[in-house]
Amino acid sequence: MSPHRSAVHHPVLAPHPGATHRIHLTAAEVSVVVDVTDGRSPAITHWGAALGPLGDEGLDAVCEAAVDVVVQNAVDVPVRIALLPQAADGWLGRPGLSGAREDGSGWSPRLVTEAIALDGQPLGASHAESGPGLLRFDLADAELGLAVVVELELLPSGLLRQRAALTNTGETPYLLDELTLAVPVPAHADELLDFAGRWVKERTPQRREFTVGTHLRENRRGRTGADSAHVLHAGPSGFGFREGEVWGVHTAFSGNHRHLAEQVNTGRRVLGGGELLLPGELRLAPDEQYTGPWLYASYGNGLDEVASRFHRHLRSRPHHVDARRPVTLNVWEAVYFDHDLARLKDLADRAAAIGVERFVLDDGWFGSRRDDTSGLGDWVVSDEVWPQGLAPLVDHVRGLGMEFGLWFEPEMVNEDSEVARAHPEWIMAPSPDRMPLRSRSQQVLNLTIPEAYAHVRDQMMTVLDSCEIAYIKWDHNRDLLESATRATGRAAVHEQTAATYRLMDELKVAHRGLEIESCSSGGARVDLGVLERTDRVWVSDCIDPLDRQQMNRWTSQLIPLELMGSHIASGRSHTTGRLHTLGFRALSALFGHLGIEWDLARATEAELAELREWIALYKEQRELLFTGDLVRADRGDSVLWLHGVVSPQRDRALFTLACVGRSDQSQHDRLRFPGLDPEARYRVRPLLLGEGPTGMSLPPWWRRAAAQDGVVVPGAVLLRSGLAAPLIDPEQGMLFSLTREGAVSPAAHD
Ligand code: DGJ
């Protein structure tokens, strides 16, 4: 990640100068074709639907089609879009590599390919066909003293990822401004979809036309951001969950970063991304190297397939979480800073009695932290509120059969804290004499200073060693504004992000099995960089189920449900003031890693009984939820949203129907259930818990299903024609369970 001294790389194989290599990778119905014509820098010439075995003729045809026709008043050679697009090849859009020597020279590289390897083996033949695999390109501009290794990997899920590492092979420092990778998308991808958002309203979708120019999403928050682009998609106008070819990219990084969609006046379009470096942040001394983050790229028919490639990839990792995600109670909205042992033990008793499996103590247990103005950075249990330490609570929680989790915010500090008083130089600031504006009354602790890093690590380790803590809620509650090393004034967001990752890794190595939740003022740190070392994200501080219908729906465009913290809160939302029934709150939380965030001492017996039923249902369904495919129905502007999870064998499914508004029409369009096997027959059972939704006006099939053990319907009907939709009140919902009937539909054989 960070620049480090490294030996100048040695090419795996030096192809004949000017040699042409064409490589076709394919996996899970996706093909990627890469072209290295005449030893120039590599270019993707196809990324999209699988092409089948291509042979030499096919490969040549695909690569030729990606080359512009030479036109008047433009460069005299054919231009194509390289992985690292460069002016030396005639590209007039955003260059992949930007930077210069201190005297201003060396800013326009002409990188050529010196070596290519596939899965670690030098690439021999000029044309190659392979399944999934990792391609490595060693590029260099010997004259300018620059060497770049680009790795491009097609994963078994069909997800494509690329990253680039730059080495300064010259004799003077090189100031790197940007290393942005690009992937081409075709001209019929004329609409963009990405995300905006704010605190308590993360990941709100926005669409626009893909026109000439650059749609640039730059992030200077030093964290992923509530308004992160999340996944930047391109596709034909109106593309939906199930329809339209869609291409999407995601920059897997938690510090400053960018996503972009660019169209130049030739009509060529690219999606791209990389780290955003601040002025002077990356100065590479001779032989130093910088490695950028992975840029993930997912292609599919509809947004569901794009999402499913991310999900399959994440689920295939050896360290991915177990599908039995424990029901979690987090105390934040129950007690806030009011830490009282008796009250918390009582909350734990009530939680255990309804089936909770993990109990998390939030902010307020350390130092002088009695509210958010003081004590942050002092990771020592407070004598004032915890005179006997945390052990009495931890032992109590564990004695009830639950795991214990604890909140930290390791990268932050209040100026009113022991650590800030002792080491004001550890606070990030643009100069020794000027502090950044406070945000949530706090500043950023500079983990790039080895002593500061060691201080935080050691204090955290001491707490973790003192009792059985299975889980950390890792918070990060402010943007990195003017974040520099105070003594020098040099920007340090890049290094700070690296230090945060390192600290997470170190804690995990020292405490095997420790889970970490990525929280950042709610959902401002959701990305595949942090998810390499964390096990869950907190989607939002807004637990209002109506808003969560939207936020969870779009957060899962990148991450699977088991990584998405999804809680049932009290009846009146603490962030919106809206009131919701327990049924709607629980049904909305069910499609995620379920938790409770509610002072259960205030819940009625009836509510506790219903909550117990929802928790039991979650435990029954979690394996399906966390191994199945997420499917979301395209329902135009209907206020009835339908989404579900279908098992990999397509023999079980669970669907939610949520009414998110009031319709102008009295009838709803039919419910078509995506993802099912058209050749199977399914038993459809409404799942009714508690009082059920209000305002129900039910179609005949529903009445029959409720009176008997469901109704049996051919998969093709559910998938393609649909069932009549019930009418329910706004902010109400219902669940359906579908199971395949043993026999194959006779109609399938007609
Ligand atoms: C922000 C988080 O999102 C909340 O859940 C809570 O942990 C607070 N911080 C505590 O300060």
Image (tube, rainbow, N blue to C red):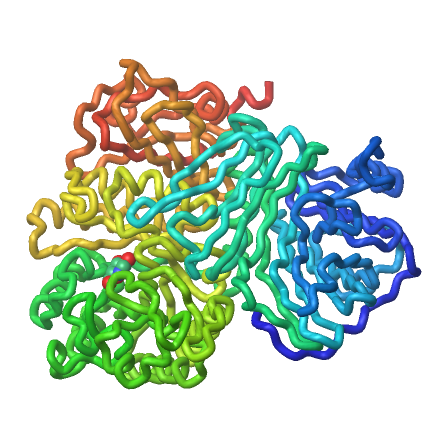
Q: Is residue 466 left or right of residue 611?
A: right
Q: Is residue 664 left or right of residue 85?
A: left
Q: Is residue 171 left or right of residue 350?
A: right
Query: Which corner quadrant of the image does residue 462 belong to?
Result: bottom left
Q: How many numbered marks appear?
A: 0
Residues 741 and 16: in front is 16
Q: Is residue 384 left or right of residue 151?
A: left
Residue 112 lies, in percent from the top left, at: 82, 58
Residue shown at 45%/83% (left/top)?
A: 450
Residue 376 lies, in percent from the top left, at: 25, 73
Does residue 624 appear in this view?
A: no
The quadrant of the picture occupied by the N terminus is: bottom right
The relative height of residue 355 versus residue 147 in the rendered view (above or below) is above
The quadrant of the picture occupied by the C terminus is: top right
Residue 715 lies, in percent from the top left, at: 47, 27
Query: Which quadrant of the picture is home to ligand 1?
Result: bottom left
Residues 89 and 563: in front is 89
Residues 179 and 388: in front is 179
Residue shown at 56%/67% (left/top)?
A: 280
Residue 679 lies, in percent from the top left, at: 54, 27
Does residue 639 appear in this view?
A: yes
The relative height of residue 396 versus residue 480 in the rendered view (above or below) is below
